[in-house]
Image: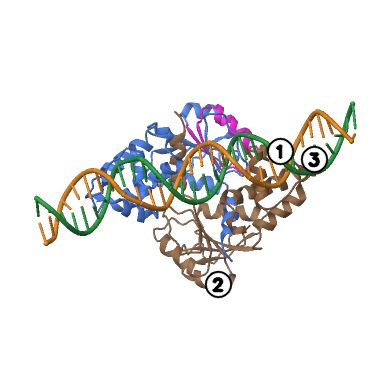
Chain colours: A brown, B blue, C green, D orange
DNA sequence: ATTTACTTGTGTTTTGATTAACAATATGTA
DNA sequence: TACATATTGTTAATCAAAACACAAGTAAAT
């Protein structure tokens, strides 16, 4: 099975399985059943087993899945690229939140650069990450081998900048900008529009 | 057609259509074609037309959709609940970002309360929104008729708190906490796990 | 009046993921 | 050994969203 063909939903769940296993379960259990893992994440046991099948992981009929092995296997799959360098564009509240979050959590994602336009912020490290002017993005991205960009700027020029970022060699972009992006083939894009999500919640929230 | 049966994707796109129309198009055009709207949002024209069909909106064969009418119609659908009061739980970077964002944007969502546990923050308004201690959530939610809660706390007790919030009468929760929630029937839940999303981007980003 | 070009509106098909169903398997017990 | 139980692994069915395909309508050009 081509690993890159795994459904996005599966990858997201794998990330959550792993976090759940390393955070809650690892210390007091050796094995876990599909229905237990499912209950923790509010999924069905079938879905858990399906995901296991997709990544080619087996459990035992009597004891379920060995937690350590499972964590190992999930990591093999989702960390297959090794350590990945990330740059955060825009050091407003959201940008700061993300830098902090990635430093606090155990993860192979390292924030290696921050970009902004505000001279107050540039050249002062934030949580010991250097902050550069956006105009230097090409150089810094290449120097630091940045693979992932997180866009948290308010900017209207987000689209042009995203193209420039992609051109500099970034192959994954997470876009918190309200501007919908269209990137060259081969650059993976994840968009999250906070206002749209909130409007959706408001719509489906019953009166 | 039962309005609450509209697919989530359609609601999200409606929110984006409206923003696009009011931001870019309104000032220099009277009508717009499905393929133009689609191009702006990087969708297919068929999808746009399908969404129009679902909300029962018609265009003209020659001129496409009248922008003013369309905005009006979309607003009828997605703003059908009128003004909606929102509370933000946790005034860290992410919480601050969201309060600011909702105040800047033209929207019917009003942040009417902030909750935190840090005594430094409590009772000092943030961007003129009052900040309360979390222990008062029941009272404040009722007093201020809060409908939507946004959870941005780091906390491990997020789940218990969410249940309490739901019990207080909130019917829509947006969860930025890494803890997966299970809420009573009738409370709409939207989860967004930033770390999981980033891990997904890292996975699909080609080397 | 006819044709052409372009668009909307919608039935049909495809796709992809989730859910359901169940066969296969291991373990403990009589 | 045979049986009961509980779980996994996988095939088949279901479902929902998106893409396709085209009929129908309209205005302009000939």
Query: Distance of mark 1 from mark 3, alpha carbons?
Result: 14 Å
What are the residue bounds of the magenta stretch? B147-174
Is label 1 in a helix, a strand or a loop?
helix
Number of numbered discs visible in the structure rendering: 3
Q: Which residue is mark 3?
A: A62
The x and y percentages for residue A20 are: 69, 45
Circle 2 chain: A
Q: Quadrant of the N terminus of chain A?
A: bottom right
Gap between marks 3 and 2, in whole Å?
Answer: 51 Å
Task: Say whether marks 2 and 1 touch (CB < 8 Å).
Answer: no
Crowding at dot 2, Cα within 10 Å, few <14 / some 14-19 / many 20+, comes out as few
Q: Nearer the viewer, mark 2 or mark 1?
A: 1
Locate residue B81 relative to residue D8 in the image: left or right.
left
Q: Nearer the viewer, residue A53 or B34?
A: A53
Give coordinates of residue A102: x percent, y percent: 62, 55
Identify residue for label 1: A36
Q: Which residue sits at x=77%, y=42%?
A: A61
Residue drawn at 58 percent across, 56 percent down: A5
Q: Could you tell me which secondary element the residue under label 3 belongs to?
A: loop
Q: Nearer the viewer, residue A26 or D6?
A: D6
Q: Can you give x and y, in whole percent of width and height, for residue B15 in the image?
A: 39, 44
In what element is the residue under mark 2? Answer: helix
- Pointer 2: what residue? A142
| Comes first in the chain, label 3 or label 2 | 3
Quarter holding the C terminus of chain A is top left
Residue B150 horizontal/vertical position (percent) = 52, 39
């Amino acid at each position: 099975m081509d690993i890159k063909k795994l459904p996005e939903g599966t990858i997201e769940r794998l990330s959550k399985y792993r976090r759940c296993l390393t955070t809650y379960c690892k210390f007091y259990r050796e094995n876990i059943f599909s229905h237990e893992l499912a209950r923790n994440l509010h999924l069905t046991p079938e879905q858990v087993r399906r995901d296991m099948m997709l990544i080619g992981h087996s459990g035992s009929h009597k004891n379920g899945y060995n937690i350590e092995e499972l964590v190992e296997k999930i990591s093999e799959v989702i960390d297959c690229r090794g350590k990945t360098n990330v740059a955060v564009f825009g050091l407003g509240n959201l940008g700061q939140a993300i830098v902090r979050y990635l430093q606090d959590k155990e993860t192979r994602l390292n924030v290696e650069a921050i970009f902004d336009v505000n001279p107050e912020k540039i050249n002062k490290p934030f949580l010991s990450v250097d902050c550069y002017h956006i105009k230097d993005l090409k150089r810094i991205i290449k120097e630091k081998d940045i693979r992932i960009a997180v866009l948290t700027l308010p900017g209207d020029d987000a689209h042009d900048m995203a193209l420039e970022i992609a051109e500099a060699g970034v192959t994954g972009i997470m876009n918190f900008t309200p501007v919908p992006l269209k990137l060259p083939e081969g650059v993976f894009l994840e968009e999250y529009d906070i206002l749209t999500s909130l409007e959706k919640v408001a719509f489906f929230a019953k009166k």
